[in-house]
């Protein structure tokens, strides 16, 4: 049985705008996941082939997400978007890829609809293994910005270091622990030139390689 969770993120736009970004496959590609070769197929599978939508709620029906739904609600003049996985099991604080994924993707959605509607995203997605606390501390020293989210396993920083971009760090061990384990870093960018994007990839690749082993980079739409 899937682990129960409830992920919510508030945005400064109307519910109708969020709903459009959730149901238009071209717009989903500007905030969901990262620019992997499989992204188009993943969007088709999750949001088209295995979903049903009401005016304010989308139910995801694949085997991995059975019973899960995404909903959008008004919150003052803003909107609240939620991903809910029902269940009766306790939240033991252990890493859950689905839960942490929705945390990341909803913040990427927020950055897109608030600041980059109509723009094409390009991402850098780094993987590796390292000490969670050391990576977290080093990242705080490297990247300036506003912490949009600080959780047990995921940190989200809105930055102007590479335009109005977004950074998501996720580690399987808790961020505050001294444990070593899998880690991912996603940089979402909009509006960078090819040269700026290439330079960003080179700079961050070198930095990431200094903090993890087994470094890999997925570089989208270069």
Image (cartoon, helix red, strand yellow):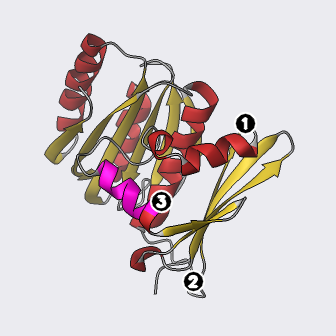
Q: How packed is label 3: few (under 14 Cα within 10 Å), some, or many (20 or more)?
A: many
Query: Which badge, 1 or 3, comes first in the chain's sequence?
Result: 1
> Where is residue 143 drawn, in percent x and y?
43, 26
> In whole angstroms, how far apart are the C-alphas of marks 2 and 1?
33 Å
Helix, strand or loop at label 3? It is helix
Residue 150 appears in view: no
Query: Which badge, 2 or 3, comes first in the chain's sequence?
Result: 3
Q: Residue at x 72, y 36 (%)?
A: 13
- Within the magenta stretch, is there residue 41? yes
Query: Which badge, 2 or 1, comes first in the chain's sequence?
Result: 1
Q: Which mark is residue 90?
A: 2
Q: Residue at x 48, y 24 (%)?
A: 119
Q: Does residue 114 lie above or below 28 as drawn?
A: above
Mark in the foreground, 1 or 3:
3
Q: Residue at x 55, y 42 (%)?
A: 109
Q: Which residue is mark 1?
A: 13
Q: Which mark is residue 47?
A: 3
Helix, strand or loop at label 1? It is loop
> Where is residue 3 drawn, in percent x and y?
49, 79
- Of the pair 125 and 59, the residue shown nearer to us: 59
């Amino acid at each position: 049985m899937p682990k129960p969770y409830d992920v919510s993120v508030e945005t400064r736009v109307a519910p109708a705008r969020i709903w459009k970004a959730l149901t238009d496959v071209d717009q989903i590609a500007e905030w969901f996941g990262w620019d992997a070769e499989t992204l188009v197929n993943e969007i088709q599978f999750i949001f088209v082939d295995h979903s049903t939508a009401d005016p304010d709620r989308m139910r995801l029906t694949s085997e991995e997400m059975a019973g899960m739904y995404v909903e959008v609600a008004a919150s003052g003049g803003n909107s609240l978007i939620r991903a809910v996985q029902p269940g009766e099991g306790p939240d033991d604080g252990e890493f859950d890829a689905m839960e942490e994924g929705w945390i990341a993707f909803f913040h990427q959605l927020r950055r897109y609809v608030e600041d980059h509607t109509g723009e094409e995203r390009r991402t850098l997605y780094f993987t590796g293994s390292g000490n969670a606390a050391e990576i977290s501390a080093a990242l705080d020293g490297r990247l300036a910005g506003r912490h949009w989210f600080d959780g047990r396993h995921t940190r989200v920083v809105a930055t102007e270091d590479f335009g109005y971009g977004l950074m998501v760090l996720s580690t399987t061990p808790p961020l505050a622990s001294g444990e070593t384990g899998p880690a991912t870093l996603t940089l979402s960018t909009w509006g960078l030139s090819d040269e700026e994007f290439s330079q960003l990839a080179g700079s961050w690749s070198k930095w990431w390689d200094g903090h993890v082993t087994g470094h890999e980079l997925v570089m989208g739409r270069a």
